Image (cartoon, grey):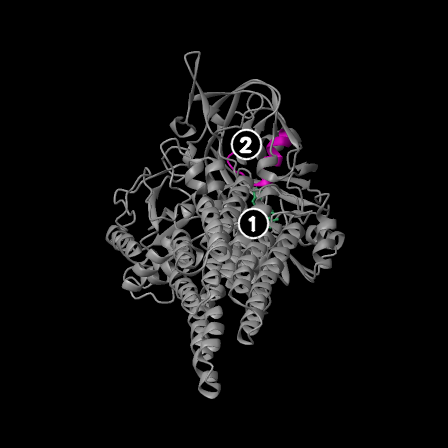
Amino acid sequence: MKKSWALDIDCPNCAAKLEDALSRLPGVETINVDYVRKTVTLTAPDADFDQVAEAMLRKAVQVEPDARIFEAESTSAHGAASAGHKPHNHEHGCDCGHGHHHEHGCDCGNEHNHHHGHTEDGKDSWLQTHALLLRAGVTAALLLIGALLLDGVPATAVLVLGYLLISYDVLLKAGRNIGRGQIFDENFLMTVASIGAMLMGDCAEGIAVMLLYQVGEWFQDKAVDKSRASIAGLMDIRPDYANLLTDGTVTQVSPAQVRVGDSILIKPGEKVPLDGLVLTGVSSLNTVALTGEALPRDVSEGDSVISGCVNLSGTLTVRVTSAYGESTVAKILDLVENSGAAKAQTERFITRFSRVYTPLVCLGAALLAVVPSLFDGQWLEWTRRALTFLVISCPCALVISVPLTFFSGIGAASRKGILVKGASYLETLAHLDTMVFDKTGTLTQGSFTVTSIQAADGDQDRLLELAALAESYSDHPISKSLQAAYGKPLDISRVGQAEETAGRGVKAMVDGEAIYAGNDRLMADLGLAPAPCQEPGTVVHIARKDRYLGHIVISDVIKPNAAAAMGDLKAAGIHRLVMLTGDRQPVAEHIAAKLALTEFHAELLPEDKVSRMEALLHEGGKTAFCGDGINDAPVLRRADLGIAMGALGSDAAIEAADVVLMDDDPLKLPLAIRIARRTLRIARQNIVFALGIKLLVLLLGALGIANMWLAVVADVGVAMLAILNAMRAMRIR
Ligand code: ADP
Ligand code: MG
């Protein structure tokens, strides 16, 4: 079983430490503490899930008393649709012994860090958000007065007052954390560094360092919050309300309250809140929020509408066909919200690295203070230099900016209708060598036109009618095309039990008789051997149990963008483009030639496609499979990366794939690769940049060139720049 909570935690490094501690608890299968999305996700065996969750929550407060975990309202589940969080039964507030004046927040003196410490109206007051800046202002004034205007004891008194004002919360936290044996805690290290500087006679430096640190953290926090909000905004397709129609009156309700079969009213400009069928009205829908493409789609009576689209022109009455939890929008949101779980290797590396980074820098500081002093006896000078090290001991810039970069890359992709289920898939996408395709609906449009009909008894119309009836229960592109080709409304009551065999065709009872429609293989199963068809195209044979009735030749067209997409993929360095299809050899040959694919395999059953995929995987390199989710879910799962196309409406595809393309434009593939590579490049830049600057400052500090001021400025500055750089991953040309 798996469950997510909302998390309020103030430092990214603490989130990493928390995850580490929680992962060691007995019974925990996986735990994901996501600082960027502010969630904790636990998987544990169903049987003792409640106990494990209880233990996890208890442990969390022990490890990070400032962390608060709430029961989150899930989007997809049966809860309401609002984005709010309700407090968890066990109020995991802070235990710092100070007055609690927020609704479910706590006041440990670090108001600036509380993103969710809201007052009743849901907003922090101006004073709460800016308390730190006020403190900083007063401290700066005291610093000036103490350093420039006063001397002796009054000066010291004013400076100490200033110091306490700006740093009391850091001091308190440091004290509490030492009590719990956490010495490599940034609060503690900042305390040691600043008090050390003051004791060595440089009061102004001690205060300035704390001042810069606090103000820097404040801005860093705000920057992360802002980025988080704008990325989340990119992905927000959540409908706020539905206009429920009951006996001619309209009431505005939450989409979650609407039941299947209810009627809702959708006015122009409103979001479609739930999936349904149009009862009355004509309008066009904008799918841009879902697909990234602003193509209006015309709908009228009888057409289906998908939640998340925006109604552009007319008013529609719609009969709801699935509850909110099952709707397209809820499924997409669920996927997006869980995209933090599949962490990229780069992210995992950073987490591991950050665990050793702080102790290493502290060790370096200790050595720097002691070793050279043994030779030259200049203890004071070397200690001063060592204290500079402590200021650079927090790996914050890395720990925030790398996950934030991935999050913003995922956000950018989703804006284009490319849903990526986790940063690790973004990584695979960036490193692909081989791309394997399904044919129908992926490279071709999947809407076949009839090119010829050969009925054994000469009655072509009746043969097409029989085929359309037999196919009436299937969602396969062939079935849909035959129904469309028949053109007239089908009398479904004539069709009894129907079953479909993947890669072969369908069998259905029509007018009380078993009718088969499918390929050569299906006919062979029946012991029938129709004469080979010379015409190019896909052949659908129709037979009764013992009698061959004739065949229909249909043909599909290649998607207009397919050739361009294949060209782009090759240009992007994906040299191997493979097509796997269940269709006939000549059809496959024609398409492979048209698209300049490097290889193709035809007449495959779904299980053959899996074994072909396995052979390709065996040859090495990263291999993606791209299909429409119809008959190819097993291959989608098997590939290094499963990409489902045209997911608007297909649940199977959304579930089986790692990357979901909301529409079926093949050009989204090279686009996805570009976004992935850019995101990875930015993540790498951030790592190199942050580590490079830190190393440089360490070096300058050891040489006595950089003082503590510079160290703080560099530390905070690097974090800010890395956050800004991370945001670049959000923009795509
Ligand atoms: P593709 O590899 O092109 O996506 P599938 O694996 O879905 O194709 O199907 C392979 C072949 O099986 C089709 O070309 C067709 O001959 C036959 N087939 C599959 N489903 C059906 C169906 N519903 N009706 C008729 N024929 C079908
Ligand atoms: Mg297919």
What amino acid type is highlighted by mark number 2? Leu
Q: CA distance from mark 2 to mark 1?
A: 48 Å
On the image, which quarter does residue 180 sit in? bottom left
Between 300 and 308, which is closer to the camera in this rendering? 308
Q: Tag 1's secondary structure?
A: helix
Query: Of label 2 and label 1, which has the lower sequence position?
Result: 1
Residue 376, label in figure: none
**Which residue is found at the position 43% from the left and 72% from the top?**
362
Q: Residues within 10 Å of mark 2 (few under 14, many from 20)?
A: many
Q: Nearer the viewer, mark 2 or mark 1?
A: 1
Q: Position of residue 44 (x, y in %)?
A: 31, 55
What amino acid type is highlighted by mark number 1? Ser
On the image, which quarter does residue 719 sit in? bottom right
Vertically, is 291 above or below 658? above
Vertically, is 590 above or below 311? below
Between 522 and 224, which is closer to the camera in this rendering? 224
**Which residue is found at the position 47% from the left and 68% from the top?**
353
Q: Horizontal placement of 29 versus 231: left or right?
A: left
Vertically, is 712 above or below 702? above
Residues drawn in magenta: 472-486
Q: Residue furthest top?
A: 248
- Queried whether the magenta region covers residue 292, the answer comes back as no
Residue 605 visible in the displayed image: no
- Queried whether the magenta region covers residue 476, the answer comes back as yes
Residue 469, label in figure: 2
The residue pinned by badge 1 equals 408
Q: Main secondary structure of the magenta part?
A: helix
Between 437 and 359, which is closer to the camera in this rendering? 359
Q: Tag 2's secondary structure?
A: helix
Q: Position of residue 381 (x, y in %)?
A: 48, 76
On the image, which quarter does residue 662 sit in? top right
Q: Position of residue 299 (x, y in %)?
A: 60, 25
